[in-house]
Amino acid sequence: MNMMGGILSASGLFSKQSIFILMVGTMLGYVVLPIFLLETSSFYPESIQTRSNKPDPRKLESGDDIMSRLIENKKLLSVQSMPTDRSPNIMETAVLGDHRRKKILVTGGAGFVGSHLVDKLMMEGHEVTVVDNFFTGQKKNVAHWIHHPNFSLVVHDVTEPIMAEVDQIYHLACPASPPHYQFNPVKTIKTSTMGTLNMLGLAKRVKARILLTSTSEIYGDPQVHPQAEGYWGNVNPIGPRSCYDEGKRVAETMMYSYKDQSNVEVRVARIFNTFGPRMHPNDGRVVSNFIIQALQKKPLTVYGEGDQTRSFQYVSDLVDGLHALMNSDYDGPVNLGNPDEFTMKDFAKYIKKLTESESEIRFLEKTQDDPSKRKPDIALAKKKLGWEPRVTVEEGLSKTIVYFQQVLDEAGEIIPTGPGASKPQN
Ligand code: NAD
Ligand code: UDP
Ligand code: UDP
């Protein structure tokens, strides 16, 4: 009796249709599937195919067997993490000898300033670890480093302790735009206080040098103009900006307490308003708002009469300043900013001119405790670091306008964040 006849007589239930399906299925299983598998296997990298060549655990491996396994593993790793025609290209960076290559932690490294700093440190050939909770930062800001062997990304909140072995810590983690730091003021305070405490504890344990990105906001609504480092400031301790201002003031205090009590090597940068590509289009700061409004021909929103002043520096200058400060011998607070000062009214007109926009300028209600003037005295940075801004505001704005135009081309319409507290958007 042949096989088909056996099945038929055994069941007595099969229709002609089901016999046909059975025959086709058998053919698929025995003939087509093996051919298909043979064919498609050539699409997979060799390393993936070799995964099935697992050694027999009962067999004792010889030295040669172990060597060939190592070679296979290396092939597997190289396919997964090194550039091939299938995987992303890796940016070429300087190669530093072991004694010069540093292990550097950048908290807040996925944010606007942090990501530019990471670019510089990576290009120099250091091993960089970014710690970020993505509150206001974006993964895309560091996505170009993800496959680089010198780069690590740790999604972590600095208010929780963290263990790592590092030589330097750039501690930037903290929301910086008023609508975002006011969205959850208690969290902003925790980030500046508990976050800085944890980073100082880490710096103390591993004997790393730590740099805090403090802010011109520690001068509050200043009664001295321009502001030099010796000025103690004029801060409302219970206003809407206090979670940020007082948080940073305490953070500075902690830096110098750890220096005095535990000999931690500290650096403190007091950063003045900074702008450039990778600013979050919805962060509600004046540069992003005005440019996005002007490019969309929407009204430029000036808060109050627009007589308050700010001085704007381009992000690459700031990054150079942070780097110079970290690697200098000076451990007092240092202002980093561009003294080029504008009233917000004039700044709105300036952005209109640079974007060739016909937008109207609309005056909205003044926001509480908005500092009336701000301009850095940078004599100390010049003297101690040999640093001063090199990019003019106009040059920097031109680059930033190109960036925001690209963002708009990708995103379509953007409604800028207004003056009130606001959750960061993606
Ligand atoms: P940003 O908001 O773009 O970057 C801050 C980064 O910190 C983000 O990636 C955010 O996700 C991360 N972060 C926030 N809270 C965190 C937490 N609890 N744990 C881990 N990560 C956290 O802001 P930025 O403009 O790049 O500012 C960077 C630093 O510079 C901040 O410390 C800010 O206070 C300081 N600063 C900036 C300016 C400026 O004009 N850009 C001015 C003065 C000071
Ligand atoms: N810390 C940390 N990583 C470290 C060392 C310390 O996150 O590698 C944290 C630690 O959990 C503590 C903080 O830093 O909350 C301050 O540490 P420190 O040793 O100064 O203080 P202590 O632990 O004695 O209170
Ligand atoms: N500002 C404004 N319109 C906006 C955003 C901000 O007039 O759409 C003003 C704000 O009131 C402040 C200045 O611009 O006086 C700078 O604001 P920003 O939020 O950029 O930074 P700040 O220096 O206040 O932290």
Image: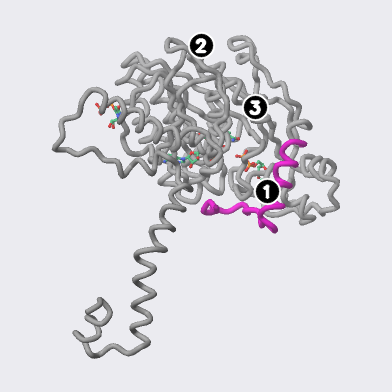
Q: Amino acid at mark 2?
A: Tyr
Q: Amino acid at mark 1?
A: Val
Which numbered disc covers residue 330?
2
Counting residues from the start of the chain, the first of labels 1 and 3 encountered is 3
Helix, strand or loop status at disc 3: helix
Q: Which residue is mark 3?
A: 316
Counting residues from the start of the chain, the first of labels 3 and 2 encountered is: 3
- Splitting the image into 4 quarters, where does residue 30 fall? bottom left
Number of residues whose C-alpha sits closer than 10 Å to that of mark 3, classed few (under 14), some (14–19) or many (20 or more): many
Q: Return the x and y of residue 246 as percentages of the image width and height.
A: 46, 35
The answer to which of marks 2 and 1 sits earlier in the sequence is 2
Above/below status of 204 relative to 9? above
Of circles 2 and 1, the one toward us is 1
Range covered by the magenta-colored residues: 398-426
Q: Position of residue 36 (x, y in %)?
A: 44, 58
Secondary structure found at label 2 = loop
The residue closer to the viewer here, 390 or 2, is 2
The reply to whether the magenta stretch includes residue 406 is: yes
Q: Residue furthest front?
A: 1
Label 3 sits on what residue type? Ser
